Image (tube, rainbow, N blue to C red):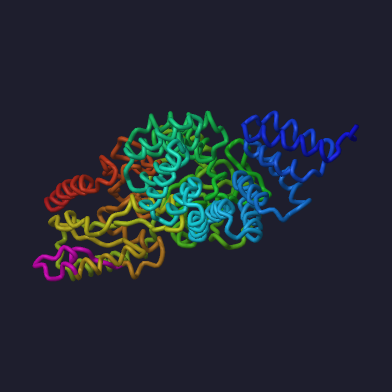
Amino acid sequence: MSKPGNQRQLDTLLQQAVALQQNGALAEAEELYREILAIRPKHFDALQLLGALSLQAGRLDDGIAFLKKAVSIDGMHAPIHSNLAFALNAKQQYKDALASANRALALMPNFADALNNRGTALGALDAPAEALASFDRALALKPDMPEAWNNRSCVLRDLDRPADALTSCDHAIVLRPNYAEAWSNRGNALSDLNRPQEAEQSYHQAIAAQQTLADAWNNLGLALVDMNRHADALSSYDRALALKPDSVEGHWNRALCLLQMGNLDAGWQEYEWRWRRNRSKASLRAFTQPLWLGAESLEGKTILLHAEQGLGDTLQFCRYAPMVAKLGAKIVLEVQPELMRLLGPLEGVTQLVAQGQPLPAFDTHCPLLSLPLAFKTDLASIPGTTPYLFAAPEAVTHWGSRVAAAMDASSSGADTLKVGLVWAGGNRPHVPELRKNDARRSLALERLIPLLDVPNVQFFSLQKGPPAQQLAALHERHEASPRSVARHIIDLTAELTDFADTAALVSNLDLVISVDTSTAHLAGAIGKPVWILNRLDTCWRWMLGRDDSPWYPDVRLFRQPTLGDWDSVIDSAREALIALAATQAAT
């Protein structure tokens, strides 16, 4: 008789297990692999095959553990390192995944699977160009690899190449017609191309292929928002979260949808999921002091309120500082340097600190955009009284003189309406999500020509950043015109050093017309009438189906009726401006 556990017996068990695994009998195969390991715990083939089987069954932690044991016995097998890279990517451990993929490629440089796994890790580590090169190498070696075509589409979107991403998805789908992830990514590319109806169809194809694909339900919700179908979008997010309750993006998108729909109570609670997003984690403050969300008494305590997002967010939510102060707290307010002079006199603030500077001692803290949750803000309790920010009187006087001199130089009459103009928001090309929003909320100055020829209006540019160069270009294109509309815009922005200067200039104007930018928030906060030219997929703070804002009583919203329809917005604003200018002239 042979001894228990002799080599022939183990080889027979291994052959049987491999055959079972190849035929899809995973449970039976696993039982045999474990039997082998019970006899010989360091059996290399059993460990690496059981690791692969565990990954096949979706048990990532088990698979990683078995593969690592196999590597500790013999680390010279490229497929094991590649499988580890696949599993670590799935666990979002991207640096370790990249290291494993690189080890596989060091052993086998032309290993397409490892190149694909390397590309996935690089894409997640914000190296899309390197990721694309890795996917292209994989596909040059193995053109019929649908996973690489699909993954390639994701980094092409990150590189702002949505049309190429769409083509890459189509390659994946030709190779695997029921490839749910590729259909979902195809919808993402179509969404980037502002084709939401087609995106919706692709997401439904993904769901038909795999009903349990939470990402497809989540992405479908985004397309429905782009078609102004927010109730349907909310249902889609709910389906996604039923399938994947810990989906950070599902909770985030649900938060935005709830806030847009005016369901603030539920929306603020969901909004706290922002800190789990990859894009927001870098802004999460690792204070030892506790987070305050309204439950604990602040009497006699010092609380740090800190800006966390854009300048407009700070301008909108610093209004809560006086409310916090009334709870008996001393307030340290940390804000962006550009806002220091403007926010210096803000009611209730004991000490103002610029971001990046040392902080004084404090007992507790709260990010500015968590204050609505702390105060349980609903539609009826939004602290909408303005102004709550004020330009310095001496600065208002100074800028009043500058405006008057510019008006005299342009031969504008005393009854001429003075209107500030902002046509583009900031551009953040390194963040794909924000890049799309920036493109959708902004327009070219040329598009505003119908406004510029309204009689009895003198425009003042409030535009900063690269889009401000469009004014000089507009001058050049229309210089020969007998009545150049470009001459209707006075540009004093070179003299603006920060938001305190901008507030003083705006204080001397009658109206601000702006796309959705921080300047619109500034005008609203100092109580200046502001007309916001707003995209269809509006920022949550402007809500839905209304032309006013409970946050700013002097705001008027001009909304796109369909995605990308700026003509209707500009036509409506032009009619309103004609009427306002006529009223101004008659007084």
Q: Which residues are magenta?
A: 477-492
Look at 84% across and 36% down and name the residue there: 39
Question: Which residue of the protein is positioned furthest toward the front in this rendering?
Answer: 1
Magenta stretch: includes residue 490: yes
Query: In the depicted view, which residue is nearer to us: 167 or 540?
Result: 167
Location of residue 393 (image quadrant): bottom left
What number of labels is visible?
0
Name the outermost residue toward the left: 482
Question: In this rendering, does residue 400 appear at all?
Answer: yes
Image coordinates of residue 564 in percent, x first then y, are 28, 46
450 vs 115, nearest the viewer: 115
Is residue 201 a member of the stretch shown in magenta? no
Query: Where is residue 401 shown, x and y percent of the image?
Result: 27, 67
In this orientation, does residue 334 appear? no
Residue at 21 percent across and 66 percent down: it is: 474
Query: Does residue 386 appear to the left or right of 16 in the view shown?
Result: left
Q: Quadrant of the N terminus?
A: top right
Residue 117 lies, with reference to residue 370, above or below; the image says below
Q: Quadrant of residue 31?
A: top right
Question: Is 1 placed above or below 576 here?
Answer: above
Q: Position of residue 281 (x, y in %)?
A: 57, 50
Residue at the spot 12% in from the left edge and 56% down from the top edge: 455
- In depth, the one of 435 and 568 nearer the eye is 435
Question: Residue 23: x, y in percent?
Answer: 62, 32
Residue 48 relative to residue 176: left or right? right
Q: Closest to the observer: 496 or 275?
A: 275
Compared across the picture, whether 171 is left or right of 325 comes to left
